[in-house]
Image (cartoon, helix red, strand yellow):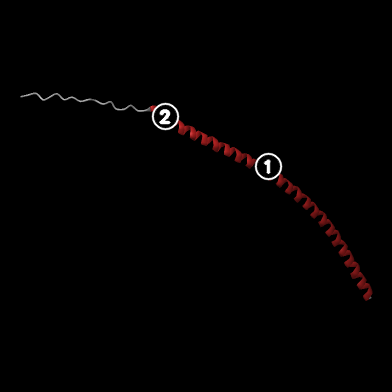
Amino acid sequence: MSEPPPVTAEIIAFPPRRSGPARDAGQERLQRALAALDEAVAGQRAAIAAWRGALANLSTVVSGLGDSLHRYRSSLDTLGTRVAGLHTQALRLERIADAALVTRAD
């Protein structure tokens, strides 16, 4: 029997992973995400500042409204006093008129 011929093979090395570009891509994505987050936070800061300004304006307007309502209430109180005085005077005049009619009927 003859021996089989020897088997020879060339082993080709598997290409190594390139850790540089994959890590760089991850770092780039992370940087973009952080930049977007910073932009969102800045937008929220601006929105909160605008909201606080609106609240300050609302507070001023409500305070002015309260002052206006206080003056209106004071005017109504004065008017109520004047109407009560006129009512009293009207009742007095009515009694005088009734007395005059009774006197005239006699």
Picture quadrant of residue 82: bottom right
Q: Earlier in the sequence, mark 2 or mark 1?
A: 2
**Badge 1, how many Cα within 10 Å: few under 14, some, many 20+?**
few
At numbered mark 1, what does the secondary structure look like: helix, strand or loop?
Answer: helix
Judged left or right of residue 15, residue 53 is: right
- The residue located at (59%, 37%) in the rendering is 45
Percent x, y for residue 61? Answer: 71, 46
Q: Nearer the viewer, residue 21 or 59?
A: 21
Can you say whether 67 is above or below 99 in the image? Answer: above
Quadrant hosting residue 77 = bottom right
Task: Give the Cα separation between the discs numbered 2 and 1.
Answer: 49 Å
Q: Which quadrant would the N terminus be assigned to in this image?
A: top left
Give coordinates of residue 104: x percent, y percent: 94, 74
Is 87 positioned to the left or the right of 4 in the image? right
* Mark 2 burial class by Cα count in 10 Å: few <14, some 14-19, many 20+: few
Quarter of the picture containing the C terminus is bottom right
Q: What residue is rendered at 91% in x and 73% in y?
A: 101
Q: Position of residue 81 (x, y in %)?
A: 83, 56
Q: In the picture shown, does residue 16 fall above or below 93?
A: above
Dot 2 and dot 1 residues touching (CB under 8 Å): no
Residue 58 position within the rendered picture, expressed as x and y whole percent measured from the top left: 68, 45
**Label 2: element kind:** helix
Q: Nearer the viewer, residue 1 or 52?
A: 1
Question: Which residue in the structure is indicated by mark 2?
Answer: 23
Front in this rendered view, residue 64 or 103? 64
Amino acid type of the residue tagged 2 in the rendering = Arg
The residue identified by callout 1 is 56
> Mark 1 is on which residue type?
Ala
Q: Residue at x 76, y 47 (%)?
A: 67
**Which residue is depicted at the point 52% across and 34% down?**
35
